[in-house]
Image (cartoon, coloured by chain):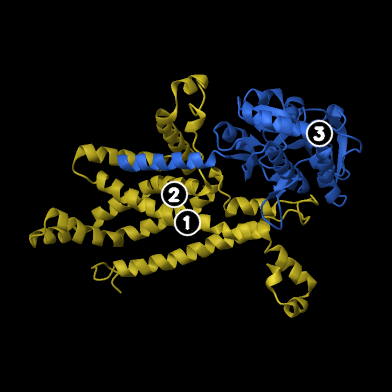
Chain colours: A yellow, B blue
Amino acid sequence: MLDLLPEPLKAWLGPDVTFWLGYFTNGKHIAFFVSVHYTVLAALLGAACALVFGLMGAALWTSRNPWLRWPGAVYVNMVRGVPDVLFFLFFPLAFEQAMEWMRASAVCTPEAAAERAGQWPPCPDANIFFSTYEYLALACVSLGIVYGAFAANVIAGAMRSVPRGQLEAARAFGLSARQVLWRVHLPQMWIYALPGLSNVWMLIIKATSLLSLLQIADIVQLANRLGAPNFSRSAGLVHGDWRWGYYLVLLVFYIGLTFVSERVFAALTRRASRGMAIEGAAR
Amino acid sequence: MKKLMIAATALLMLGGLAQAATVRVATEGAYPPWNYIDDATGKPAGFEIDLAAELCKRAGVECEVVTNAWDSIIPNLVAGNYDAIMAGMSITDERKQTIDFTQNYYPPDPSVYMVRKGTALDFAAISGKNIGVQGGTIQAGYVKENFGAANTVKEYDTADNALADLNAGNVDAILADGGYVRDIIAGSNGALEIIGPDVKIGGGVGVGLRKGDAELGGKLNAAIDAMKKDGSLDALIIKWFPDMAPGPIFAGN
């Protein structure tokens, strides 16, 4: 990377500055900077999944049909009580083994399966290897399931907060139940849901630091690795414990992400409150 | 939904077929000079990465090095996420119950204690001390069994983190492989030193394989044999472990 700088600029900067510029742009650090995309992707896709699960969970939970209401209630109340770390470990493993089980029933011959009795996978051909991005997709779905339960709770609450008069007025104008839901109830729900959803989004951002559990080399794991003291001559620059410096960079990164998110949610709130008869919102 | 599942399964099957040709070798990437992440390239490098390239060439297989955290490196081999482990892993009877090993490619190397310069420890009657080890290693098992009752054993996920705590004064000593400790001490500029007795544990370092993977095991064993005979393994060991005692290691045996 340093080779890109013109010679006179290097001479002006001096050997010390060019050395550190070179060190902080070497392959190891480039990998660290690039790994930010795992965190951002996981947060965005995880939030999208959480919103989908949240809407479905809320729709089930607020349904009048008990056969739908009960699964919704179980989802919202049970999943919220499970630590996200546990779900993060459980879901990808269970998914992988379920896929292997399905594949085993298709590709394993009885002889091959008998030979490996009691072992997993049932035969070598049934084995599945997930790449980093497939694990990332599973991580997003895991985040979606866990935080979807929180989102469902927020959305169900917001649905109940829409003034009944609005819905009754819509029915009185001759709108069908479905039209009331899509044209009046859901659009008006957002203004009540947004503060709660912004909370869930912040939780999702923080939960992305769990990515390293799925062998994804994310910023948290790499910061830990790059900052760890190195006394080995073969492994590059010999230095002491620099982890606090790298953690500080992460701290600033996450605060920056939070700051940007707050701006975005403020803009969304302004948009959602257009024409709404809510105190303080219709500015 | 059902169609989607079938499509997904079909895709995964195709993926699995395409991957079948390459042998995936897992390493930790945090145990210099065996394996570490290179500063300049950001990719795994070290003794075992060089050795893996040479062994695969001789065995006539295509290889790819992947990194995996130490604490899950055996479970993920068994689950089939990769085909071999080369991560400074000593051959022990306990591990042999779960996985197979090739013959050793690094000789039995006594473990040693690393301390901050000037620390005095009486190993005959050591008590009330903090001893650091990497979790799930032969050293962790040894220290817990012998010193666990009277001392505190701190287990770390990586050797780096154990070293950080030794530096910070949170542990009194670290027990680790001689080859690793000597490399660290040489680079520490006199801040760390070796004390106490050598601890003779482990049967050398070998390639970890899934149980019953005789085909790959046979190929790798033949390649290691050839490298031992022609002296190229000795040369590679001396290149990466210059602090090793001089003399023939495997050649001529």
The reply to whether discs 2 and 1 touch (Cβ–Cβ < 8 Å) is yes
Percent coordinates x, y for residue B27 in the rendering: 66, 41
Q: Is residue A171 above or below residue B171?
A: below
**Callouts 2 and 1 on one subunit:** yes
Q: Nearer the viewer, residue A237 or A266?
A: A237
Pinpoint the chain carrying mark 3.
Answer: B
Residue farthest along the right direction in this orientation: B247
Graded by Cα atoms within 10 Å as few (under 14), some (14 to 19) or many (20 or more), the crowding at tag 3 reads some
Q: What element carries label 3?
A: helix
Horizontally, residue A118 falls left or right of residue B226, namely: left
Q: What element carries label 1?
A: helix
Percent coordinates x, y for residue A152 in the rendering: 32, 49
Residue A140's disc is 2
Horizontally, residue B54 falls left or right of residue A113, namely: right
Residue type at numbered disc 3: Lys
Horizontally, residue A91 falls left or right of residue B243, namely: left
Q: Which of B119 and A24 is in front in this view?
A: A24
The reply to whether discs 2 and 3 touch (Cβ–Cβ < 8 Å) is no
- Tell us which disc is closer to us: 2 or 3: 3
Percent coordinates x, y for residue A150 in the rendering: 37, 48
Q: Is residue A238 above or below residue B133?
A: below
Graded by Cα atoms within 10 Å as few (under 14), some (14 to 19) or many (20 or more), the crowding at tag 1 reads some
Residue B232 position by quadrant: top right
* Quadrant placement of the N terminus of chain B: top left
Horizontally, residue A45 falls left or right of residue A190, namely: right
Residue A41's disc is 1
Q: Reading the chain from its start, which is encountered first: label 2 or label 1? A: 1
Residue B228's disc is 3
Q: What element carries label 2?
A: helix
